Each structure stands twice: as C-alpha cells, then as structure tokens.
Image (cartoon, helix red, strand yellow):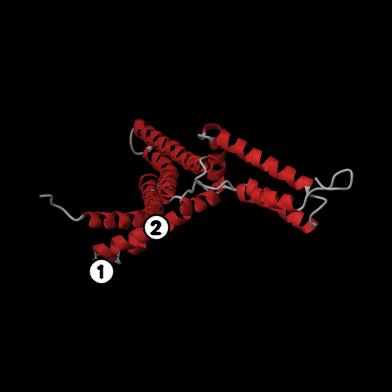
Amino acid sequence: MPHGPPHGVNQEGALILTNLLPGLRELRVPLGCGAAWLASFYLLMAWRFPDALDSLVAPFRGLAWPEWLGQGAALSITAFAAFLVGSVLDVSPDKGITKALVSRLDRHFGANYTDYEASSDWAFGRTRRALGEMREVIDPELMDELEAELAAKRATDHATLKTELLSANKEIYSTCDRYESEAAFRLSLLLPLLILALSAASKFPLWMAILIVACACVLGLRGLSLAISARSLVRQACLSGLLAHPLTALESRVSTLKATHPAPTLEGGTK
C-alpha cells in the first residue's frame, strides 16, 4: 500500500513553489549583492585601512545594539541594509553598459541569432514595400503612424518579448527568468570579488588574490553566458511560432489595408 501525501497535495505544493520562486529570485540578487559589497568593503577597510575603520566604528561601540535588540533583530537589520545596498549596486543584464555588452556578445555567440535577424529583415522588407505601394492612396497621417510603428517593432528589445512570453508559455518564461536571475546574481558579485582580491593581496599570499580574481572572472563569464541563453530562448519561441514575431501583427494590418486600398496603375485604374 503506497504511503505519502495524495497526488493533489503534491500538485498544490508544486504550484505554490512555482509561484514563489520568481519572488525569491528577485530577493536573492539584491540581498546577495549587498552582502558581498558590505563584506568586501569591511575587509578592505580592516586589511588596508584599519585605523580608518576604528575611527568609523568607534561612535557605535558603546551602543551594544545587538544585545539590546537581540541577535534576530540585529541580523534582520543587517540583512535589510544589505538589501538596500544591493538594490542600488546590483547589475542587470538588461540595463546600461551590461545590456550593451550582452547585446554585442549575443550577436556573435547567441544561438539562432542569424535566423531570427533574417526572419526580422524579411518581415520588415515585406511590410515596408507594402507601405510604399500604398503611400499615394492612404491618409498621410496614417502612413506616418504605420512607418513609426514599423521602426518601433523592428527595434523591439528582449525585455518586451520576454514580457509577452509570460502569457504565451509560462514554463519557458520561468526558465528565461531563471537564466536572467542567475546571470544578474553572478554579474553582481564580480566587482565585490575583485575588491576582495585587492584587499587580500596585502594580507595573504599573492596566489590567493589571483584565485579570487579567477573565480570572479569565471562567475562573470558564466553570467554573460546565461544572459545570452535567455535571449536565445525568447528568439527560439518567436522562430517556432510559440510567440508572435513583433512584426507579425503589423504586417497583417498592412496587408489588410493594402487589400482595401489598392494602388493605382499607370492607366488610372487600380492593381
């Protein structure tokens, strides 16, 4: 006779865990990043500038706040401080310099990048030719609107497509979100580890600092690889038809307009 919880209970627990994991990922990145920054800053001050650290903490030594608040409250305050620091200093694959770097690497190493770009160019060319044929028969304001939308759809970025993937396939979206969260976590640890290596170089043998730098580089490369994999997943969803290509809806709209607004021929009729 089988033992254990009913099958429905397992499914309910899996559903709760599935809904909880994205939130835990969002919490882990700033918390881990902030803790790494605080630890690296403390060790840098302790090993490189001990006198400055003593001056910095001297006003707080008489407070004895861990004993007054309790260890749990002290730990909570420290974790909250780490979360605040990490929220400011975390590194996202879709922001700033990191986004530009990931985009450049994605062009060279991303799976199915060439196929996706060819598909986008083909759809863009068809839509632009159709708009050119209708230029004389539709309202100029509508033409300007369609051309602006065409340019915007052609430049649709990864973040927009990923958002649309949430309603198309939650499982693939969850995988993509996990890749990006893992990438952000690794990239956010890169600079604190380099600061830690700089601090360790004056306190420990040189090989230890080199080892920390090597670990930081491995984490950074792995983070970039995961960010590229997340983009490849979204592109594959577009190529397989699971996710509508950004230009598909506009191309369909332009085709409908073209059918209802036939272009004039040289003889004065319509095509």
> Quarter-wise, where is residue 17 in the image?
bottom left
> Quarter-wise, where is residue 198 in the image?
top left
Q: Quadrant of the C terminus?
A: top right
**Amino acid of disc 1:** Trp
Number of marks: 2
Instruction: Please name whichever residue, 202 or 250, is drawn nearer the observer in this view of the structure.
Output: 250
Instruction: Please name whichever residue, 265 or 193, is drawn nearer the observer in this view of the structure.
Output: 265
Residue 36, given in percent of the width and then of the height, sits at 38, 49
Q: Is residue 178 above or below residue 62?
A: above
Identify the residue position indicated by label 1 in the image. 68
Gap in angstroms between the C-alphas marked 1 and 2: 23 Å
**Amino acid of disc 2:** Phe
Do the residues under discs 1 and 2 have CB atoms within 8 angstroms?
Answer: no
| Dot label at residue 83 | 2
Instruction: Please name whichever residue, 4 or 1, is drawn nearer the observer in this view of the structure.
Output: 1
Instruction: Please name whichever residue, 243 or 76, is drawn nearer the observer in this view of the structure.
Output: 243
Q: Is residue 9 above or below residue 203?
A: below
Q: Residue at x 34, y 58 (%)?
A: 79
Element at label 1: helix
> Quarter-wise, where is residue 144 in the image?
bottom right
| Residue 26 horizontal side relative to residue 143, left or right | left
Element at label 2: helix
Disc 1 residue crowd, few under 14, some 14–19, many 20+, Cα 10 Å: few
Residue 230, given in percent of the width and then of the height, sits at 47, 43
Residue 176, given in percent of the width and then of the height, sits at 44, 46
Furthest toward the left, the residue is 1
Label 1 vs 2, first from the N-terminus: 1
Q: Residue at x 61, y 35 (%)?
A: 118
| Residue 59 horizontal side relative to residue 226, left or right | left
Q: Is residue 56 visible?
A: no
